[in-house]
Amino acid sequence: MKRGIVIGSGIAGMSAALMLTETGIETSLIEERPCLAPLLRGFDRQGVHFETGFHFAGGLAQGGLLNTWLKVLGLDLPYGRGLPEHEIFCLDKRRFSLPCGREALLAWTRNCFPASLAGMETLLDEMSRKMQESPYTSPLQEEKKSLFASADCETVTEHLSGLPLDEDLKAILHTRCLLYGAVPDEALWSEYALVSGAYFFSSSTLPGGGECFLRAWEKALLKKGVRLECGKAAVRVLLTEKEKKFFVSGVELADKSVLEADYVIFTGSPAQLPELLPREAFRPAYFRHIETMPETPAPFVVYGIADNSIPENTCWYKVPQSHHFYAIEEHDPTLTIMTGPCLADGRKSCLALGIHQAPVGIHCKKPDSSLYTTAKGLLTLKLAAEAENILPELKGHWTIAEASSSWTMRRWIYGSTGSIYGCAHTKTSLPLSPATRVQGLFLAGQNILLPGMLGCIISAAIAVDFATGRNCILDRFRTCANEE
Ligand SMILES: Cc1cc2nc3c(=O)[nH]c(=O)nc-3n(C[C@H](O)[C@H](O)[C@H](O)COP(=O)(O)OP(=O)(O)OC[C@H]3O[C@@H](n4cnc5c(N)ncnc54)[C@H](O)[C@@H]3O)c2cc1C
């Protein structure tokens, strides 16, 4: 029996481990933190649960792409009980409540931007077509085309400027680039169509939020017999050399124990790779590329508790007027406010998230503690005031329970380097390929394909199909999609 090791137990790692086992490979899942999927866990304050790395997902509705992929993984979830997200785009003092689904979106456009109806129709059709281009996003696609944008470098700004769309509508559509942390001038249209496209067609969560997904993943991993090694960092990927080629032989853990393997799928930050692997295994240009890969900005988040006057499961985006997203430190920053489900007493989590300019990366040093505390306090006040500015109904109806900077994120959201979506995917930064020069070593996760639940699961599927050299997972996806 072949053996596989997956390093990192985020959405990508847990998915890759399930899929590897599914193909008959004896699999171990290694996580440096004490428990699985730190980013999905969230935390509680004053009896209210706060989500950290998961709030809403696109394509989760019945028949949606994410829904199908969760079934491919065999997760026991309350499918069909999705809670819809209400998305409100705040443009100056105006508010636009964006619905989901083709027909509802067209009716909304006819009502709010009648002159843009034809442009919106074209855009939605183009997004559907883009999603049908890859076999990992459409069961009808026979041709094995890559999901990795390299040939098509058109940006979101360029693409939308070619359509007859009102400027305010374009600004609303640009805001969706926040879902993967790249400004519309740099974000690739083909990636927008996949990540944001899924949200246009459905956007929701499940009762229980991130923890509900986490429990389903944990259950499936135990059922499939995946060996879980939590609280142990992988410190070295062990290789053997034969005729100038390198082959994976195992992984050394922080406690010096060694696990042998024929395949290793790494889902952490690529910035770690130069430390995990011997330099001679790769061309110098590969490590140089990794060392200069830009990251998405960090988030600064204020966690508040809102009363029953503020709607539950709602998301408000402040629409930036330019093509750029402004950090919380700047004038007129871009932000998002999200509420969770209502408790019996009407209270709910209310989270305001801004972009943060902090220098983050796994090698950055934390600033001196008194400077840090003062700066964090000031940013908390600023972000809370900005939130009340775009949503005046919050005044007197929420209290701040917690705040997190990029440094807190690195503690709470252990896996990431503090940046909101890991490596940036833009027209100027080529992502790493899931296959590497080392035989048996593959890369997956938000740093490789795209952020968000859908991007991470598809990335895991691609890595596993690469590893096994068969299309087992793709075949399962086709079967599940056809059953739907
Ligand atoms: C504030 C915030 C809000 C978000 N909201 C949403 C949302 O609403 N919807 C959505 O779909 N997505 C959302 N995302 C994005 C989503 O959370 C991520 O895209 C996704 O969780 C990334 O998963 P991953 O498996 O690629 O990486 P990670 O979750 O970062 O997992 C990598 C894991 O590897 C472990 N690890 C790293 N190195 C090692 C090592 N050497 N040895 C052992 N273990 C190691 C880490 O501890 C970590 O657990 C949000 C993210 C943030 C930060």
Image (cartoon, helix red, strand yellow):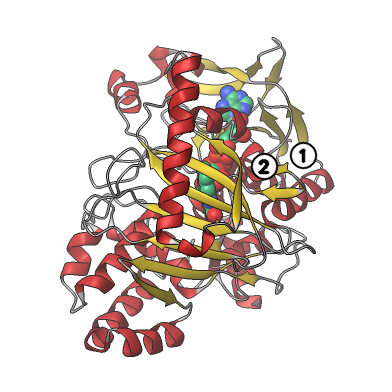
Q: Please state, as top left, top right, bottom left or bottom right, where the N terminus lies in the image.
A: top right
Position in image of residue 256 (x %, y %): 69, 9
Crowding near pointer 1: few (<14 within 10 Å), some, many (20+)? many
In the image, residue 413 above or below residue 457: above
Quadrant of the image occupied by residue 474: bottom right
- State the residue at coordinates (46%, 13%): 368
Answer above or below: position of 74 versus 356: below
Q: Is residue 31 above or below residue 335?
A: above
Q: Residues within 10 Å of mark 2 (few under 14, many from 20)?
A: many
Who is closer to the viewer here, 77 or 145?
Answer: 77
Q: Position of residue 183 (x, y in %)?
A: 28, 50
Task: Report whether residue 468 is seen.
Answer: no
The percent position of residue 192, horizontal first and vertical second, equals 35, 60
* Numbered label attached to residue 226: 1
User: For the residue labelled by badge 2, is the local secondary structure a helix, a strand or a loop?
Assistant: helix
Determine contact: label 1, label 2, CB under 8 Å.
yes
Residue found 40% across the figure and 13% down from its top: 279
Q: Which residue lies under the disc numbered 2?
A: 17
Residue with the most extreme top position = 256
